[in-house]
Amino acid sequence: MRAVVRAARGGLGGRRLQAVIIGVVVLAATAASTLAVGLLAGAHSPFDHAFAAQRGAEVTATADLTAASLTQLAATSRLPGVTAAGPFPVAAVTAQVTVPGVRGSFTLPLQIAGRSGPAGAVDKITLDAGHWPRTAGEIVIGRRTEGSLGGTVTVGGHTLTVTGIADSVTRTAQAWVQPGALPALAGPAGIHQAQMLYRFAGASTGNAHAISAGLARVRAALPRGALLSTVSYLGVRQAEQASVAPWVPFIVAFGVIALVISVLIVLNVVGGAVLAGTTRIGVLKSVGFTPVQVTASYVLLVLVPATLGALAGVVCGNLLAIPLLAANAQVYGIGVLGVPFWADAVVPLAVLALTVAGAVPPAARAGRMSATAAIATGRAPRPAHGYLAHRALARLTALPRAVTLGLATPAARPARTLVTVVAIVAGASSVAFGTGLAASLNRAYAEISQAGALPVEVSAIPQAPAGGQPSGSGGQPSRGGRQAGVTVGSGGMTGAQQRAVAAALAAQPGTRHVLAVTSDQLSLPGLSDRVTITAYRGNPAWSGLALISGRFYRGTPGVPEVVANTLFLTETGASVGSDYTLTSGGRQVTVRIAGEVFQPGREIVLYTSPATLAALDLGTAPQQFAVALRAGTRPQAYANAVSAALGAGYEASTVSSGGRELQAVLTLVAMLTALIIAVAGLGVLNTVALQVRERAHSIGVLKAIGMTPRQALAMTVCSVALVGLAAGIVAVPAGILLHHSVLPVMAHGANSGLPPSLLSVYTPAEAVLLALAGLAIAVAGALGPAGWAARTRTAAALRAE
């Protein structure tokens, strides 16, 4: 055993570059694999991970303070098997919220809890931005609550500044203040309710029976009727898992690609390192090493730098995971994600096992060879490998000899070349997939918000009634994919307001089309959720809504027509072309479904003409005007001009095609693509470094007969250039196929079909550029070893073995 260790140590001392390459590639593979496993684990159940990290409340209980005292509520935390936080005073208020940079304010109902800090034994609040309230004039709002940092929240004459954006994984409240600040917000009625947050033994595994048993113990310890309501986290968990569904497929796709490419590179680098040392294996056998000793010494030679690389890779993987999983958590809409502890243990062990698996076969094969055969074989690839390719390319006199020598090199090691091709294909296909996914998501958000077709919206700011707070929502974002300025179910503009807005828009030279928008809600038999129904006064095709199938409704006499989103068709069992009866109060109107529109989410949406709203006895007065602009018109400048023309009492604003969620998704896609490109580039670097190492003597001979450093550089780069170009050409259809496979799954997770426009995002020119991604990865990975080949002195290269 001592001889084996001494041989391995000597091999490391004589092959420092090879050891560094093994360590760096194993580091990169371990880091990528650690991150990939962390992403896959997070995608599997992000809510559960966040729930455990934030010690989420399994039950949120609201207590009546007239029936139970704060002391009695606090005593329930000492019951057997019960962990609790609270009591926290709570108040349900109606607030006026302002956003920095946005004119006016909007009305928002808020459930505010009084908490002195975000920490606690149950429901640890995570701060996305800002800080926890320190004074009575400060408030923190929830991530899902409309508003932003630096804005204000006004309740009953008391104005509070938003100092933080926070998240409770089980949504225990919508805003938080210091406990002493809550009585003033509650008003003359005072505070009569408090919140208790519970965790019960055995309930965190989703055991509903354990939750029921724990609640029974709490109820028994309190006066009768003390608990007004109890909300289990299981309902929130189900809703969160449904919201995660659209994003899981693309994260899983990137994770699988990263794992596959890491495995291939580890096997390639280890197998190549052993093959590159075949000459030394022959020397060891000539001094008396047995086949078992030879195999053990080379496995140990590879395992030492691989172990160091794996340990460093776990650390780097966790550091890389911090920004990626933060973006991932923002995509999922939950608080905290992290690499699980088991991944930090399993991944390096698996990489080391792969290292051994990659080292044993070639080392054992070389160990069984005779000393003479091993020494001869280790000098270079066998003459039969690549001979025909060299002869054929030598006839291409139009190309420099250095180029043809490089182009023929991959034929010498076909197995290694194949693994390199697969690695480059994985990297380049990730570029194609990521590019298409980013384009599709940008287009999807633009079509959902209609920002591309209708970038400007104009509405009247609701006036405050005498002695009260302003009515309406004055710009509150609505649901169901509607434009940001529409308030569902509001009374709409007066005739004078409509005429004023229409005249102002007609006077603007940048106006192309104008749609008057009215939105309301219906309760339909058999549907638990209300249906948002929107009418456009004008051509609905101007709206920019994407049709999945069918056509837009027509406002012609006869059977009224609507277009519906996929969820409506799924929930009702209706289809495009069929009839459906809408009800509103005592009115019933049979409509024909003319088309299916792209509006993903958990809300049911219909679009129709104002005549259909009138038939249902719903309001038809527009709540806003949506404006399509002429080419070259800047939306913000147009909105400013309209605001100046209308004056006070009106609001003109631009429509954003996406918010923090879109930016988080695009950031995540970009970072994952960059990571996979880097790992693929390291795979190329390893391949070229092994080639240069094997051919060091040949390079010395070529330099001795006149090859210049520039020619050596060109020869080495060309050894992978053709491979990279071929891999890039293969990668484009592979990436497009992955895009076309993953996107429908994402849409299905969002309760929607997929319009053709979201799939057709690749132009011929973009496809050609994407095909060059493989060449770029290959050249970038080869430049390092190629530079060494160009700089090395002739004498040093001739001495290389």
Image: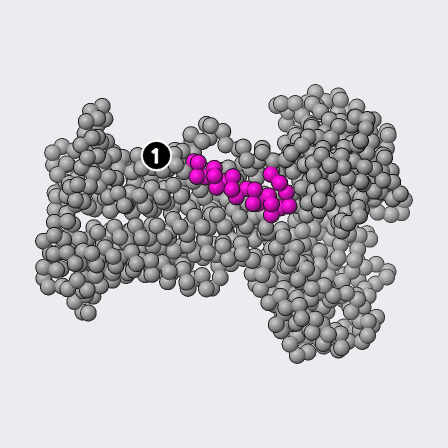
The N terminus lies in quadrant: bottom left
Residue 579 lies, in percent from the top left, at 76, 37
Residue shown at 67% from the left, 71% from the top = 209
Instruction: Residue 237 in the image: state x and y as whole percent.
Output: 64, 59
Taking the spot 31% from the left edge, 53% from the top edge, the residue there is 267
User: In the shown orientation, is residue 716 left or right of residue 644?
Assistant: left
Residue toward you, 395 or 710: 395
**Looking at the picture, how far across and down is residue 560, in whole percent?**
79, 32
In this view, the residue in front, 746 or 432, is: 746
State left or right for residue 798 relative to residue 489.
left
Label count reads: 1
The colour mode here is one colour
Res 166 seen here: no
Does residue 132 belong to the magenta stretch? no
- In the picture provided, is 129 more to the left or to the right than 673? right
- Give the overall secondary structure of the magenta segment: helix
SS label for mark 1: helix
Residue 678, by quadrant, is top left
- Relative to 383, is 506 above or below? above
Residue at which label 1 appears: 725
Residue 530 vs 188, above or below: the answer is above
Q: What residue is drawn where x is 62% and y is 40%?
A: 753
Region rendered in magenta: 732-754
